[in-house]
Image: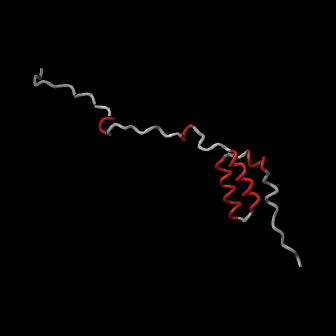
Amino acid sequence: MATIMKPARSMDWTKERIDALQTTEIRQLRANAERLNDPEIVERCDAVLADRPRGGGPGSIKPPKSTAPRAARKKKAAPAPETTGDTA
């Protein structure tokens, strides 16, 4: 009778290889490893994510909210030029 062995996926994902990935890719790898019940890869992903700074990129900082009312923040439109009743 043949023995069915689990593929050695965790050997392919070293900590150094995981560290080379972008944070979003590591999160996806972690989710996949959790779904496939591979706790070794989950632990490696967690270790790499723990070493990374949080909230880093230039788009992650929100501008401060203005305390002025919304109507006061809008720029007023230039007044329309006056027209005279004279037609030449």
Q: Looking at the image, is 6 positioned above or below residue 48?
A: below
Give percent across and percent down for residue 61.
Answer: 52, 39
Q: Nearer the viewer, residue 77 or 17?
A: 17
Residue 20 occupies quadrant = top right
For the C terminus, the image quarter is top left
Q: How many marks?
A: 0
The residue depicted at 79 percent of the width and 59 percent of the height is 9
Camera-side residue of 27 and 44:
44
Image check: 46 left or right of 74?
right
* Snapshot colouring: secondary structure
Residue at 47% across, 37% down: 63
The residue positioned farthest toward the right in the image shown? 1
Image quadrant where residue 10 sits: bottom right
Q: Quadrant of the N terminus?
A: bottom right
Q: Residue 58 appears at what percent x and percent y?
A: 56, 37
Image: 37 above or below 1 = above
Q: Which residue lies furthest to the top in this view?
A: 88
Q: Nearer the viewer, residue 72 or 3?
A: 72
